[in-house]
Image: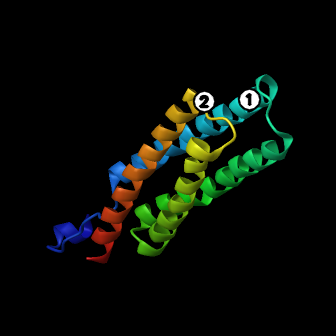
Amino acid sequence: MAAARRGGTSSVLSSLPLQMLLYVNGVYYIFYFLATLMMIVYKSQVFSYPDDFLAPDLVVLFVMAILEVPRLYLGSKGNLTEEEAPLGLSLVLTLGSVVLAVYFLAWQTYVLRADVILNALLLSTYGLESGLKVMAIAAFVS
C-alpha cells in the first residue's frame, strides 16, 4: 500500500480462482478417497474380486493420497508466494495424479458407475487446475 501511495506500482499476480480450486479440490479429494475406499471394500465383498488385484488397487489409492498432499501444498505455496518452481512441481505431480485417476476410471478390476462419476469430476478439476497453474506461471514469469 505504501508503494502505491508513493507512486510505485504494486500488483498481485497470484490467482484467486486457482487458490479457491486448490481448496475445493483438497476437500473433494477427502470425499473421493473415502468413497473409493468404501467402493473397493464393497466390490471385494459383493463381487468375486481376485485377491491378486485387491492389494494393488488399495496401494494405488494410498499412493494417490500421499501424492495429493505435496501437490496441493506446492500449488498453494507457489500461487501465494508467486513462485514458478513450486507451482511447476505441483503441475508435474498433477500429471501423476491424473494417471492414477485414469487407472481408477479405466483399468481397475471393477469399474462402477460411481467410479466413473467420481473420477470424471476429479479429472475435470485437475484439468481446470492445470490450466490455471499454467496461466499463473505465465503471469509470474512475465
Q: Secondary structure at mark 1?
A: helix
x then y, percent, for residue 60:
70, 51
Q: Which mark is residue 43?
A: 1
Question: What amino acid type should be assigned to the residue bearing mark 2?
Answer: Leu
The one nearer the camera, 104 or 110, is 110
* Quadrant in which residue 30 is drawn: top right
Question: What amino acid type should be assigned to the residue bearing mark 1?
Answer: Lys
51 vs 80: above or below:
above
Residue projecting furthest to the top: 46
101 vs 74: above or below:
above
x then y, percent, for residue 2:
25, 68
x then y, percent, for residue 134:
35, 64
Q: Residue at x 65, y 52 (%)?
A: 64
x then y, percent, for residue 7:
14, 73
Q: Residues within 10 Å of mark 1 (few under 14, many from 20)?
A: some
- Dot 1 or dot 2: first in sequence order is 1
Q: Is residue 141 left or right of residue 64?
A: left
Q: Residue at x 60, y 60 (%)?
A: 70
Q: Which mark is residue 112?
A: 2
Q: Are marks 1 and 2 in contact (CB under 8 Å)?
A: yes
Check the picture and name the quadrant holding the C terminus. bottom left
Q: Secondary structure at mark 2?
A: loop
Q: Residue at x 52, y 54 (%)?
A: 98
Q: Is residue 108 left or right of residue 91?
A: right
**Is residue 73 visible to the viewer in this orientation of the structure?**
no
Give me the C-alpha separation between circle 1 and circle 2.
Answer: 9 Å
Q: How is the image coloured?
A: rainbow
Q: Residues within 10 Å of mark 2 (few under 14, many from 20)?
A: few
* Quadrant in which residue 3 is drawn: bottom left
Check the picture and name the quadrant holding the N terminus. bottom left
Q: Residue at x 18, y 74 (%)?
A: 8
Residue projecting furthest to the right: 51
